[in-house]
């Protein structure tokens, strides 16, 4: 055990601020920073979702005037989408949902709020750096607002920003690149803070294999960010130099646009793809590993039984993260890479399904014959598992180059990554919000509204994304504003209209969540200290926790999954409870 751990209740000491802007605005308290990430992500989710609905409107009723929400948010030609603005829509939708919603929500919000509480620390190792990690997001927010406000002149190269198109687009692409640089620096600061905090500030007795799976997921994610983000940030700066300084990192020789010779050197567009996907494939696990950890903890609590195969699940998460660095080339099967590289990336991509399958098996084994409490957060937890399985199975199909070449850039790919990133990650985020809402705000969310929200979201989600597999199997292309100019695609218009109606229904279902979230802040029932009967240290303090989290340093005596104690006694035993219980599950 490190010296910092031995001292107990670690974290940089800072008094509770007496002025409101230091307490609520420029706060160094990890809980306030976590809530700032949470609220910002939810606001951007509304914006990103509106962009998605605009895309779906165009595909269902091409070149028609959008309804009121479209005319209000996207005043392009009186509410009608233009071809150029359609490119901006899918570029900004993906950018916002990945970099401003899923990652800040799962990593920024829950990571900041939960890590010190779950390991028994009073705050992060570097509170000031933690504050900066949030406020560095705001220049990124501003840049994306400017880029989106450019309308028809906005970023049009997609979220992948492939050169040479991304190098010759207008000024909005500069704002897009600069915004992502700020987001990247913010995430790097956060990852260094997470790693240091978990390694150095654990409470006495909190050994590595007594950490909750949520903390494991966030730790492994932080390591991924620390190694992968510098590569993307360097690539973004190189592309900015191509645009501003006339360098030629990514622009090929002989590029001529409108009679003007653009290239001054001999750049490599494929270099950008390698650098981009070296980060962006691990980014998939940056978005899914925290969700896996959260779901594991909630599943054990909801089933009232020990988590099956805890150590194997930890090792499988480490394996997923490690293998995530060697599979980026499967995004480039159509780029003309050698057969040897193609086979190597195919094999490594298929192998990564093994640790993912281990986790799925362990979740199902935990559910088997359990006494499940069907709370709203448990419904979202089980929903996550089903979405992850569907998305993972389609991923194995695309790992085979012959199949991938056929369905690359079709709606089969769109279906796959929305099942993994939206269907899985966002359902896990909803589960976490319902579960830790009383810890964050001292109120309980309404269970009836939560269950209605889950049922509608789950049904409309599958109605939106599952039919896209059929579109992709027919070769229906993504990123096309009007694919129906090809006669063979015209019979797919009714299916696209069905998908759009489901997407509109899914968007409307989120109004229930908004009412529940905001209403519970004001009128939600006050909970007891540990309303779910959980074992982790975060429930050993008040709701919401005070400044410094704990009145005294907690001591950890066991792992966090000590359920099914005895038929006549309590069904759980918190980590900080010194009572000795003889059990095969004792760690």
Image: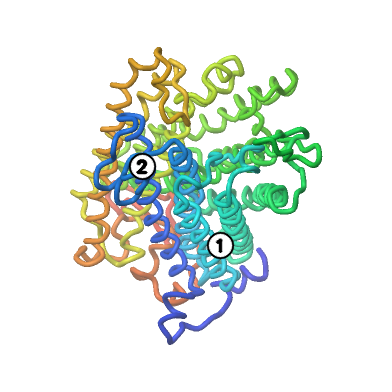
Label 2 SS: helix
Residue position for label 1: 205
Q: Quadrant of residue 10?
A: bottom right
Residue 245 percent location from the top left of the image: 74, 53
Q: Is residue 576 visible?
A: no
Task: Give coordinates of residue 294: x percent, y percent.
Answer: 44, 48
Q: In front: 65, or 459? A: 65
Relative image position of residue 142 (x, y in whole percent):
49, 61
Q: In the displayed orientation, state which residue is furthest to the front.
A: 259
Q: How far from the left and from the top, in percent, is residue 230?
A: 69, 52
Indicate the secondary structure of the residue bearing disc 1.
Answer: loop
Upstream in sequence: badge 1 or badge 2: 1
Q: Quadrant of the N terminus?
A: bottom right
Given residues 25 and 358, the one toward you in this image is 25
Residue at left offset 59%, top offset 64%: 197
Residue 9 - label: none
Task: Report the front residue among 428 and 473.
Answer: 473
Please say if 24 is above or below 263.
below
Which residue position holds label 2?
Answer: 381
């Amino acid at each position: 055990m490190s010296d910092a751990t031995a001292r107990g209740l670690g974290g940089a000491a800072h008094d509770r601020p007496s002025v409101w802007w230091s307490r609520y605005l420029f706060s160094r308290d990890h809980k306030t920073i976590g809530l700032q990430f949470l609220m910002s992500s939810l606001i951007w989710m509304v914006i990103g979702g509106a962009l998605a609905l605009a895309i779906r409107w165009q595909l269902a009723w091409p070149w028609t005037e959008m309804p009121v929400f479209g005319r209000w948010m996207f005043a392009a030609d009186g509410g009608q989408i233009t071809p150029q603005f359609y490119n901006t829509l899918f570029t900004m939708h993906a950018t916002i949902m990945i970099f401003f919603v899923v990652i800040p929500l799962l990593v920024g919000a829950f990571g900041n709020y939960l890590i010190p509480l779950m390991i028994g620390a009073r705050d992060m190792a570097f509170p000031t750096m933690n504050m900066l990690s949030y406020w560095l997001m705001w220049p990124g927010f501003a840049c994306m607002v400017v880029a989106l406000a450019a309308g028809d002149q906005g970023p049009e190269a997609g979220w992948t920003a492939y050169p040479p198109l991304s190098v010759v687009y207008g000024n909005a692409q500069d704002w897009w690149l600069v915004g992502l640089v700020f987001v990247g620096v913010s995430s790097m600061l956060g990852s260094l803070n997470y790693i240091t905090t978990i390694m150095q500030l654990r409470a006495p007795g909190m050994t590595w294999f007594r950490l909750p799976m949520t903390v494991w997921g966030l730790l492994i994610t932080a390591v991924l960010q620390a190694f992968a983000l510098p590569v993307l940030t360097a690539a973004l700066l190189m592309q900015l130099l191509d645009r501003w300084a006339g360098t030629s990192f990514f622009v090929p020789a002989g590029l001529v646009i409108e009679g003007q010779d653009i290239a001054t050197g001999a750049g490599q567009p494929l270099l950008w793809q390698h650098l981009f996907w070296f980060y962006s494939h691990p980014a998939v696990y940056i978005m899914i590993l925290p969700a896996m950890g959260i779901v594991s903890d909630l599943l054990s609590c909801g089933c009232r039984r020990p988590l099956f195969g805890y150590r194997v699940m930890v090792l499988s998460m480490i394996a997923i993260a490690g293998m995530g660095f060697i599979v980026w080339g499967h995004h480039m099967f159509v780029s003309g890479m050698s057969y040897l590289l193609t086979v190597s990336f195919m094999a490594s991509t298929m192998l990564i399904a093994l640790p993912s399958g281990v986790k799925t098996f362990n979740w199902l084994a935990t559910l088997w014959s359990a006494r499940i409490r069907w709370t709203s957060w448990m419904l979202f937890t089980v929903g996550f598992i089903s979405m992850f399985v569907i998305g993972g199975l389609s991923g194995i199909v695309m790992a085979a180059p012959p199949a991938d070449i056929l369905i690359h850039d079709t709606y089969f790919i769109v279906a796959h990554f929305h099942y993994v990133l939206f269907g899985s990650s966002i359902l896990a985020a909803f589960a976490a919000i319902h579960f830790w809402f009383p810890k964050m705000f001292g109120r309980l969310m309404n269970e009836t509204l939560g269950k209605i929200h889950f049922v509608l979201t789950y049904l409309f989600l599958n109605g939106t994304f599952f039919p896209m597999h059929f579109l992709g199997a027919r070769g229906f292309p993504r990123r096309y504003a009007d694919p129906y100019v090809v006669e063979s695609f015209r019979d797919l218009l009714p299916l696209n209209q069905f998908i759009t109606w489901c997407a509109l229904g899914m968007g409307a279902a989120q109004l229930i969540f908004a009412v529940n979230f905001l209403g519970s802040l004001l009128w939600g029932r006050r909970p007891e200290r540990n309303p779910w009967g959980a074992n982790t240290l975060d429930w050993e303090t008040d709701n919401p926790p005070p400044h410094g989290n704990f009145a005294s340093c907690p001591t950890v005596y066991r792992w966090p999954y000590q359920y099914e104690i005895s038929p006549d006694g309590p069904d759980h035993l918190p980590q900080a409870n010194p009572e000795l219980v003889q059990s095969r599950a004792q760690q």
